[in-house]
Image (cartoon, coloured by chain):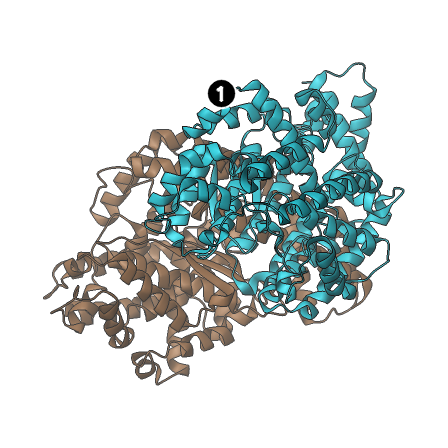
Chain colours: A brown, B cyan
Amino acid sequence: MSDPVRRFYDHAHQIFDLSQAQQALEWDQQVLMPSGGVEQRAHQLSALAAAVHDRVADPAYGDLIAELEASADPAGPLRDDLREARRAHDRAVKIPRRLVEARAEACSLAQAAWEEARPASDFAAFRPHLERVLELTGELADAAGGAHRYDALLDDFEPGMTEAQLRLVFDDLKGRLVPLLEALRGAPRRPDETLLARRFPVAGQQQFCRQVIGDMGFDWNRGRLDVSAHPFTSGTMHDVRLTTRYLEDCLPSAVFGAIHEGGHGLYEQGLDPARYRDPAGQPGSMGLHESQSRLWENLIGRSRAFWAHYYGPLQAACPGVLDGVAPDAFYRAVNAVTPSLVRVEADEVTYNLHIILRFDLESDLLAGRIAARDLPGRWRAGMKQYLGLEPADDRLGVLQDIHWAAGLIGYFPTYALGNLYAAQFMEQMRRDLPDLDPRLARGELGVVKAWLNRNIHRHGRSWPAQELCRRVTGAALSAEPLMRHLRAKCAEVYGL
Amino acid sequence: MSDPVRRFYDHAHQIFDLSQAQQALEWDQQVLMPSGGVEQRAHQLSALAAAVHDRVADPAYGDLIAELEASADPAGPLRDDLREARRAHDRAVKIPRRLVEARAEACSLAQAAWEEARPASDFAAFRPHLERVLELTGELADAAGGAHRYDALLDDFEPGMTEAQLRLVFDDLKGRLVPLLEALRGAPRRPDETLLARRFPVAGQQQFCRQVIGDMGFDWNRGRLDVSAHPFTSGTMHDVRLTTRYLEDCLPSAVFGAIHEGGHGLYEQGLDPARYRDPAGQPGSMGLHESQSRLWENLIGRSRAFWAHYYGPLQAACPGVLDGVAPDAFYRAVNAVTPSLVRVEADEVTYNLHIILRFDLESDLLAGRIAARDLPGRWRAGMKQYLGLEPADDRLGVLQDIHWAAGLIGYFPTYALGNLYAAQFMEQMRRDLPDLDPRLARGELGVVKAWLNRNIHRHGRSWPAQELCRRVTGAALSAEPLMRHLRAKCAEVYGL
């Protein structure tokens, strides 16, 4: 490698390594940090954010990128890396370091405040923290520029996506999901969901979750599974950490949470090991990331073929709990569609409506149409409108997610995009692997991992997400595959 | 605060916060990181070390320090902070960033290699890592300058101390300890140590360790106790993490290890909370730090008064194990003096000889009189000479400590200095608290913490360690208090 090329990669790798250090400290904060350490950790995260920002915005880095861009015909991977480095650099130079530090510190404190406020359903205690995060996030969006504040934020998570595009996608989706939900109300039969609320011992749930994640192909020498208030995945490649949460009277919470995070984890472990620290060797958009978790959680984890194999191991892990429950009844229970209050436990049909509510609120907040104090009321009204439910308290309402506390505004839409990508990838996987179901029914989850490794994971950011979708599936992203999947599932489970 | 003052503290705090982030990642590596994550973590630690170095060596920081130094009569704490900042800055500007990065990465990899090599007693596998660390540490010492390589390294741990001074202190100590050890060989009675090798259930040991550390005054809202291969303490003030290790057939390992680390932990939690991120608000020398751990471990934790209270709780935590063992027999067992192979489990008399051996080897290594390949042989010869023992393998010999892998060369002497400081502080504490023993015998450990908080912890780096010693005890550091303590203890336990 020529000297400027080596210097470019050294610099880019330092940025990457410091970002990973940030993630490791955030993991620590959510999993095991002593409660008193909150402010001290906020200082550390703020200092790290500033160190990352300094390196991304470093004028010498900008010069190096420009020098390499100008040189004739850079080879493939370098071109991709320069494109990603340029995007990050151009954005960073517009954002003052002071703002980066202040926002990192505010988000760290807000997350700790959320951890306390949520169980107490105390929105008032959380509100000043949220206001601070919103204020600084608005400043960030303004500094980054763009036609619309929301677009500037989206760009961090789903490069190239805009609020206007999202609104089209979501209006379309809403227009299809609401009638489907209506139709289910008059369905000839309904699954019995109460069997998922029996007492499943936590130790048995843990054993089962570890078994499934291991079978998915998660490498335990390069990862961990722990417990946190809000399930998440942290780290990459050789050190990937998943969390879930165990509720004795709600089996799906841990099981589908763990499979979901396992999907994220496989993406991180499945990147090209020679490229994972390079700017374009990292995971694509967050929508793509969510496609991996949602594909595993819903399209594999809630499939009949999956449970044909795993119902036995689940019964073995939690002896006696499911005695007398036929496999078909269990399969139908995990696929019940019931409007509910909590997004992470929502079924496949109503899930996207939870997302659309959050998108509406974020958009209104950033445009100044509403303020933080309006959120609890607006939340209740939106839930009523979309799902016909109202939370009794903010714990099950506006306080349920950590995202806004963490400064992740503009992130929720990627969950819905993930659902769309996942369904479209799944149709292609089924075309490529005609014997998928019999293999799943034998517990051969590795075949799914191998397909995803080859078609998605290894490519990192070589192409924008929508381009990768076209290359893998031969078609632009569309809501059709998801709707086909949902209609077929509902027909089977509800006898529509 | 005037603007340059505010900018000075902002900059100093960033340095501190990034250093704390480093410590948190090192803790994670030793306590729970997946085994595959070693190289990835080494990159992170290297990037962080570079970020810290950049900020310490930043010319703008140097200018700011100079500007404030020149202004008339800076108030007390600022003067101390400027002195410490100046020391760190002047050192950093002499050391190339490349060396800092390379050394951080080499140390991270060497620690992981040590973790594998130690149980396998495989010095050959560890040697190339150690050679790399020694090479880079030699370069570091040369870059930092000074009359003697060893002095340049000492300066990081015990500012102002020199190899020549240490040699005087250690020759003196050796000259007193060896005859004492001789005398014990002909002692009229010997404690029965075998009772400490009975089977103490790990759960009971854990419970007892947590109880003692809690009673010492360790604040669990601002700290944790975990397990690692080599006990250590990490973090400060609001997030202090201790580790120990539990061996079923060796009670002292966990108990005195935990009390030792608890002593370090109380120092960190006991700093001035308004000053702990300031350059002079941080703990004094490592010798002072070790005085805190050794005071608790030996002068409190092995005292008759301590066990008058804690023998009961220990028996309750490990039911039946000590049936029929009189309190006096137990007290004498934990104070047995027996030359042994492992430093961290050594008694108070032989401990310093372990240190002197390491000092000899480090000094010879840095002067080029020996090389890494000579270490196992030189280790065995030294053990034979000082303690009359030879390790059967390197696991119990040259591989027993993590320090050299971690780049901590020049650190061991601070343990012996800690023993000297501890004994001298303890004599003063007894003068100040004439009723100390009866209070200890009632389990009132808080009285010790309060004295240390007031006399040692709160002062941070306001004075150099030797000056603090003079202020607290009215005398210069001397070997007399330690020797008085050891002679009295041996007289009592061995009937000399």
Q: In this view, does B211 lie above or below A263?
A: above
What type is the residue that disc 1 sits on? Answer: Asp
Residue A243 picture quarter: bottom left
Name the image quarter holding the C terminus of chain B. top right
Residue B337 appearing in the image: yes
Q: Which residue is drawn at 34% across and 49% down?
A: B323
Name the image quarter holding the N terminus of chain B. top right
Judged left or right of residue B474, residue B26 is left
Q: Nearer the viewer, residue A301 or B206?
A: B206
Regarding mark 1 in the picture, which secondary structure is present there?
loop
Q: Could you say where residue B236 lies in the image, as x and y percent from the top left? A: 57, 36
Q: Tell me the chain of label 1.
A: B
Residue holding disc 1: B435
Q: Residue at x 71, y 28 (%)?
A: B8
Q: In this view, does B64 lie above or below A315?
A: above
Q: Could you say where residue A65 lies in the image, as x and y percent from the top left? A: 74, 56
